[in-house]
């Protein structure tokens, strides 16, 4: 499935690069599918196949904003992608950091994102997901 809006990482170009061996030094680190304190789409939900990739795309954007907010407005030097993960009973979705093992800044950024995953959806994500906005006290 290819969807550049969500950053899904199963595009033909990515597959060709993998087959050619051009990404042999690339690593992937699974971040999550949503902020750790939020309820995300569940695989048994009827609308999971629609809701999960949407949530992951929104979370991917939030992670980019989160990183930039803590790093002087600079985007992460690793690539954030929404990945389809086929499993025995269904396909589940995650946001993953893809990075060159030889790029110290990209490795550091990927692990920073994994260890600093936000607890809650931010204001923009809540708007994008059509969720109720929270007061600052919540």
Image (cartoon, rainbow, N blue to C red):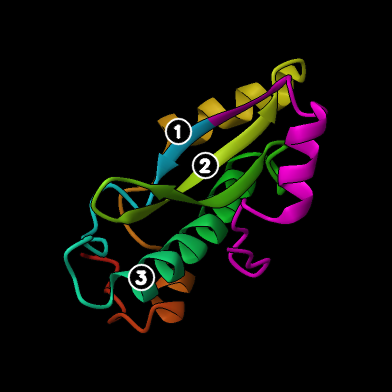
Decide which of 121, 96 is in the foreground and name it: 96
Residue furthest to the left: 44
101 inside magenta stretch = no
Q: Name the disc covering residue 114, or none.
A: 1
Residue 24 percent location from the top left of the image: 73, 21
Residue 75 percent location from the top left of the image: 71, 46
Horizontal side, residue 87 vs residue 100: left or right: left
Report the span colored magenta.
Answer: 1-28
Q: Earlier in the sequence, mark 3 or mark 2?
A: 3
Quadrant in the rendering for residue 61: bottom right
How many other residues sit within 10 Å of disc 1, few (<14), some (14-19) or many (≥20)?
some
Horizontal side, residue 34 vs residue 81: left or right: left
Please give the name of the residue rendered at 59% of the width and 55% of the height, measured from the top-left corner.
65
Q: Mark 3 points at which residue?
A: 49
Q: Is mark 1 on a helix, strand or loop?
A: helix
- Relative to 98, say whether 9 is above or below: below
Please give the name of the residue rendered at 35% of the width and 70% of the height, measured from the top-left corner.
49
Q: Name the residue under label 2.
A: 96
How many numbered tags mark residues here? Answer: 3
Residue 117 percent location from the top left of the image: 40, 41
How many other residues sit within 10 Å of disc 2, few (<14), some (14-19) or many (≥20)?
many
């Amino acid at each position: 499935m290819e969807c550049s809006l969500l950053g899904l990482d199963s595009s033909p170009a990515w597959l060709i690069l993998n087959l050619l061996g051009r990404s042999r030094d690339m690593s992937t680190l699974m971040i999550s599918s949503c902020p750790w304190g939020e309820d995300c789409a569940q695989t048994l939900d009827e609308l999971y196949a629609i809701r999960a990739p949407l949530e992951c795309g929104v979370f991917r954007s939030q992670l980019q904003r989160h990183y930039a907010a803590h790093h002087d407005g600079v985007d992460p030097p690793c690539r954030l992608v929404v990945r389809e993960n086929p499993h025995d009973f269904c396909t589940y979705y995650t946001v993953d950091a893809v990075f060159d093992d030889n790029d110290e800044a990209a490795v550091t950024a990927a692990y920073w994102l994994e260890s600093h995953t936000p607890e809650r959806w931010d204001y923009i994500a809540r708007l994008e997901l059509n969720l109720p906005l929270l007061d600052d006290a919540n």
